[in-house]
Amino acid sequence: MPRTRGRRMDNVLSRRSVLRGAVVLGGTAAAGPLLWQQPGYAATPPHGLHLTYGADPGSEMVVSWSTPESVSRPRLLLGDAGGSLSEVVAAESRPSPGLKTVQHHARLSGLDPNTSYSYQAVHDGAASERFGFSTARTGRPVRFTAFGDQGTSGGKVGPVLDAIERFQPDLHLHVGDLSYASGAGGLRVSEQIDSLYHPSVWETWLTDIERVAARVPWMPVLGNHEMEPTASDLGYESYFARFTPPATGVAHEAGATTWSMRVGNVGFVALDGNDASAEIPRNHGYLGGDQERWLDATLAELRADEYIDWIVAGFHHCAYCSSVRHGSDAGVRDRWTPLFDRYAVDVVINGHNHMYERTHPVRAGQVTTEAPKNAVIYPAEHGTTYLVSGLAEEDESLPDRSTGPVSGVTYYTGTDFGLRVPEATPWSAVVDELAPVVICVEASPPNWAGTTRMEIRSVDAATNTVVDALTLVRNR
Ligand SMILES: [Fe+2]
Ligand SMILES: [Fe+2]
């Protein structure tokens, strides 16, 4: 069912409102912790717990989880880290397309910044294990990890989650193609869709990610595989059944298909590449230009914000990638990179191509300086660095890169599923086509002289080795 931003906000239950005893749970007035009794654990417990920051990561968090069917009084128990879970927050429940499972979302607001909390998801008769999270902190480095194209393909899941846990990020930015419940990837060819669509894969995926996503906000971006063969034109029902991204983006009845937020001195912008892609046209243009207008205004705001040093944009389709599989997408490149140039966006993170790649800094389509592994660059002077990390297996033979950059392809609209145009790739700086690479980023607060650094370490999760490193420096 479509949800509007207004209705979403109506369901926000703040910690302070809980403390005032004003919350109604499943039709029963909740006066405080004494009304909750230890469940009997007879029913199947909640699973697939995952966090999403709210619009203000210092005070808002959404806790989401899944149950095998409808349950009585789904709710969240919340307390200070290590203390009693004395607060009760009702959950909003949503159906899962194609499944009996039900998705629950407890929206927390009025939390204290720089604070750790414990929580447990419960319904009558069952409870999850106890997890914890921290609200966004200020005055310390901001850490985040990123990749896309995850799926449930066994062997990589553990090492990738281990790599995130080792880095202990404030958030994980997932740049789309989440579960691959729909193997069709946005195609409309019905016979392919019927055989490739397995909604239960979402439940496997949620179970996979829980050990990290229940503690680290798992900030999602829409990929082409989130366009599922469901009832709506966009096909985003499964995504919005399971995720409640911040309602800070373009207003659309499907939900928050774009979003932005500030964490410390980093501004994040998440875009819907399906609206812009020249390669996969299913949702092309559905936002009617609103995404560019919103992006322009949002980047202007972030760049004018005295507390924001770094701007990171995440979306699925690649502006620059030398893979010959999906290559670069002229839809996102032509529509968005001029805005990245205008507002000196520091880093862009994409997925879609199942490999790792980083560019030299680029402005107006031109390399401004060479930036091999371990380089130091100044993005205010040099322009934007584009990274790709797609974890899934590549299914085409790999080009010989031993003698330098290979020829890539760019997709332009012109025929169904784009027109493939060969191009040179002088912007390609570092490539790893085999490893599952987790991008690990730390942005430091400004020092006494007003200098701040962003350290990027791209880690082969299978071997825990650094395959690429880049330092970005900005002066206030
Ligand atoms: Fe993918
Ligand atoms: Fe993709």
Image (cartoon, helix red, strand yellow):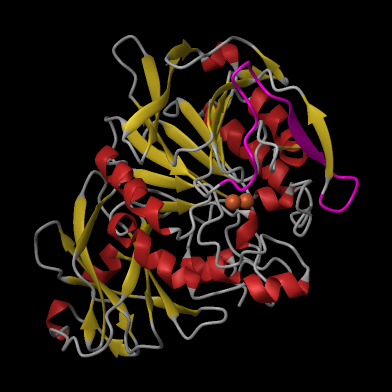
Verify whether residue 400 appears in magenta.
yes
Q: Position of residue 311 (x, y in %)?
A: 51, 31
In this view, the residue in front, 374 or 213, is 374
Q: Which residue is drawn at 40% across and 66% down?
A: 206
Q: Is residue 174 visible?
A: yes
In this view, the residue in front, 317 or 291, is 317
Q: Where is residue 213 in the image (x, y as percent from the top left)?
A: 34, 56
Q: Where is residue 56 in the image (x, y as percent from the top left)?
A: 40, 49
The quarter of the displayed image where residue 167 is located: top left
Q: In the rendered view, does 125 fall on the left or right side of 272? A: left
The quarter of the displayed image where residue 68 is located: bottom left
Image quarter where the N terminus lies is bottom right
Instruction: Pick out the residue farthest to the right.
Output: 414
Span shown in magenta: 394-417
Figure label count? 0
Q: Is residue 80 above or below residue 261?
A: below
Q: Which residue is drawn at 55% across and 38% down?
A: 355
Q: Which residue is drawn at 41% across and 28% down?
A: 307
Q: Is residue 10 visible?
A: no
Q: Residue at x 20, y 51 (%)?
A: 116
Image quarter where the C terminus lies is top left
Verify whether residue 35 appears in magenta.
no
Q: In the rendered view, does 266 fall on the left or right side of 394? A: left
The quarter of the displayed image where residue 442 is located: top left
What secondary structure predominates along the stretch shown in magenta? loop
Q: Where is residue 447 in the image (x, y as percent from the top left)?
A: 30, 15
Q: Is residue 373 above or below residue 193?
A: above
Q: In the rendered view, does 418 fall on the left or right side of 341? A: right
